[in-house]
Every structure is written in C-alpha cells, then in structure tokens.
Image: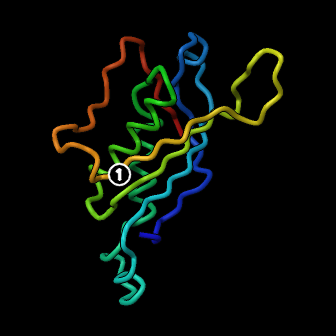
C-alpha cells in the first residue's frame, strides 16, 4: 500500500520524560504521523466518509501527548501508534515520529532527540488494547 495520510510537525506541550524537571515543567513535543490506508475510494468519490479525517487523527495523537505523563518517548510513540490503529480500523499501518526539540545533552549541539515507531495492524494481537497509565506523579493539563 502506498497511500497514506500525513500529519507533519504537530506540536504539543506535555510532561513526558525521566527527569523531575521534564515531569513538572513540561516541554514541547513535535510529532509526525504517516497513516497507511487505501485512499482510492476517497479519491474517486470525493467523500469524507471514505477516508480518515485529519482533525480526528490529530485529536487522537493529542490525547496521548497531552495526556498522562510517560517516562520514555518510546512509550509515547508506541501509545500513539497503537491508539491510532485501535481507533481507525481503515488504517493498516502507522509510523509515528516523536521529537523533543528542547532536549539537552551535555556537550552536544542538536535540533532534537526523538524516536520513530512503526506498527502494522496485522502484527498486533487483538488482545493488546491501549491502556493509558495512571501516573503516580501529579499531572498538569495544558490550558491551551
């Protein structure tokens, strides 16, 4: 399948990370999503019901990024990917890139650190629902 919906450069403020500062002060995250699905009917008929809406897909990503804090961005990316597949049955595979543009590494100059996660529906067991964890650390919601 070569068809895909792209969401590039989604920006969210979240509290994910291992350090106390990351979990209390929070930071920006930049997310890209490549959602693979068959878009032939949407292209042929020009009907929104034959695709996945950008707004719905973005809201699904937002629910994880602005949701309960996780320790690792690997877990953030995995949760996003699994939730996208669980929420949108038409999507057959998804690639999620999560970046921390404000990350610091002593002695290094960089634009961002990040992970790229790819999940394929056919490889996931139906018994692996997405559970967003309860955080033992108080969670600050974004006011925006």
Q: Residue furthest left?
A: 127
Report which quarter residue 99 is drawn in: top right
- Identified at 38% across, 37% down, the residue is 79
User: What kind of element bears circle 1?
Assistant: strand
Q: Give coordinates of residue 127: x percent, y percent.
A: 16, 39
| Viewer-nearest residue: 28 or 87 | 87
Image quarter where the C terminus lies is: top right
- Identified at 47% across, 70% down, the residue is 2
| Viewer-nearest residue: 49 or 114 | 114
| Viewer-nearest residue: 115 or 111 | 115
Q: Is residue 135 left or right of residue 97?
A: left
- Identified at 17% across, 44% down, the residue is 126
Against 54, is 76 above or below?
above
Q: Give coordinates of residue 28: x percent, y percent.
A: 62, 34
- Identified at 83% across, 27% down, the residue is 109
Packing grade of label 1 (10 A; few <14, some 14-19, many >=20) is some
Residue highlighted by disc 1: 120
Report which quarter residue 135 is drawn in: top left
Q: Residue furthest bottom?
A: 44
The image's colouring method is rainbow
Against 11, is 138 above or below?
above
Q: Give coordinates of residue 27: x percent, y percent.
A: 62, 28
Q: Is residue 7 left or right of residue 100?
A: left
Image quarter where the N terminus lies is: bottom left
């Amino acid at each position: 399948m070569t068809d895909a919906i792209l969401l590039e450069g989604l920006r969210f403020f979240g509290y994910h990370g291992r350090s106390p500062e990351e979990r209390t002060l929070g930071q920006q995250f930049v997310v890209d999503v490549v959602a693979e699905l068959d878009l032939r009917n949407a292209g042929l008929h020009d009907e929104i019901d034959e695709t996945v809406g950008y707004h719905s897909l973005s809201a699904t990503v937002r629910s994880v990024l602005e949701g309960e804090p996780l320790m690792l961005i690997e877990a953030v990316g995995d949760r996003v990917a699994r939730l996208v597949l669980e929420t949108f049955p038409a999507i057959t595979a998804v690639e999620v890139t999560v970046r921390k543009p404000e990350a610091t590494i002593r002695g290094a100059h960089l634009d961002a650190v990040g992970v790229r996660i790819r999940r394929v529906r056919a490889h996931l067991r139906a018994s692996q629902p997405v559970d967003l964890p309860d955080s033992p650390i108080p969670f600050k919601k974004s006011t925006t």
